[in-house]
Image (spheres, rainbow, N blue to C red):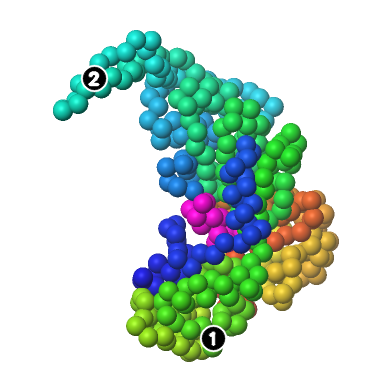
Amino acid sequence: MKTIEVFGVSNDKVASYIEREEVDSRFVEGLERNKHIIVFGASKQGKTALTNKHLKETSFIRVNCSPQTTPLDIYKSILRQLNVEFEEEKTEKTKTEIGIGASIKALVKIPFWASGEATVETKGTHGREKEIKYKTVEYNLALPQDISEILRTIKFNKRIILENFHYLDEAVQQEMAFHLRVFEDFNILFIILGIWREKNRLSQYNGDLQDRLIEIPVEPWRKTDFEKVACQGSSILKVSFDEVIDEIIKNSFDSIGVFQELCKECCLAAGILGTQDEKKLLLPEHLSTAVTKKLMDYSGRHIRSIETFVEQISKSSEEVPLYIAYYFIKYLFEKKIEDIEAGLKRADIHKGIKIIHHRPDDVRASDMSYFLHNLTSSQIKKKIMPPLFDYDRSTQSLKVIDSTLYFFLRNTDREAIMAEMDSPL
């Protein structure tokens, strides 16, 4: 096998994938039960790999979400992928408790079996099969009830995967939480993949989903898990990680994505492009090359993302911004990597920012609330994808949700990056 087929981050299956009892078994259990499945965790922690491992391509439909995606877009994509024909008639505005959204009345072409039978003759054989006829019915494609009726009519029995659910606007996530309850009644089951770290994200939007979901966190990854991944891949490629495995794990910061990439780059640095005839030992200099390569890969995106994150434009000529985002990054860059990994408490962030702020008395609790509560949505609006940070209101703590950011923060020159940014002063 090629090295890139064994190690690395990929949308395809990698040969070094290992099953974990608390993750894979629970996912398989969820597939066997009539419940929606929520798979969550930081980016590049194996959410997509989990679905690829246990689902055949013929057993699911995948919809990739974006910041502009609405429930209507999701449902139209599902119907198109199922080759359900529909003709849009008109757009209406509907007002609900969630907000105002578009609804589409459409004529949908629904198949049904005719009562009689037609004889169909094929070459060399004779057969009889039922004739399929179609009827056109008007549906509202924005309503889960109508979508469920369409899917039930065509005997739909697959899972629907919503990839990148966290990209959806918060109001859309909330609306989908209510729609999921309706779909469950029709046994239309979803698998939702999202980048967040706290439990009960969707249940917070709709309490009726409590106990109706199976939630599967893909974290944490333990040292023994990483060792099993390395062992699995090394047996295929005939290489030895004995000299470098501990340092690779240390540099990975509990991220399977970073670990996979370092293993891959380590092999490539040693000239290992595929399975070897004889076992080859990987050395510290190979790992050093791999770390340098990944730092270069991650640095460009993270520096651009951080620069975009701290940008703040005054809403009016009279306004004097507080530049909370800038001071948060400054505060973050001064923290030890161990403290960042543990999560940053709201009270500590507020106190830390006031200490270094040029107008400390103006940094109020309400300013921190606005900054933290809108943290994810503001990153998505600024096209920082995947988001770097997420704030958990239940624990009042901020966590890094881009698993490559830990690696970047450990290996980069933070002072040099701050010096390049425009200071509010």
Mark 2 or 1: in front is 2
- Amino acid tagged 2: Val
Kind of residue indicated by mark 1: Asp
Position of residue 423 relative to residue 61, above or below, is below
Element under label 2? Answer: strand
User: Where the C terminus falls, by quadrant?
Assistant: bottom right
Q: Position of residue 319 (x, y in %)?
A: 69, 51
How many residues crowd around disc 2 within 10 Å: few (fewer than 14), some, or many (20 or more)? Answer: few
Magenta range = 40-54
User: x%, y% of residue 364?
Assistant: 82, 55
In the rendered image, which residue does mark 1 sit on?
242
Q: CA distance from mark 2 to mark 1?
A: 66 Å
Mark number displayed over residue 120: 2
102 or 329: nearer the eye?
102
The residue under the point 59% across, 83% down is 247
Give the x, y percent position of residue 135: 39, 13
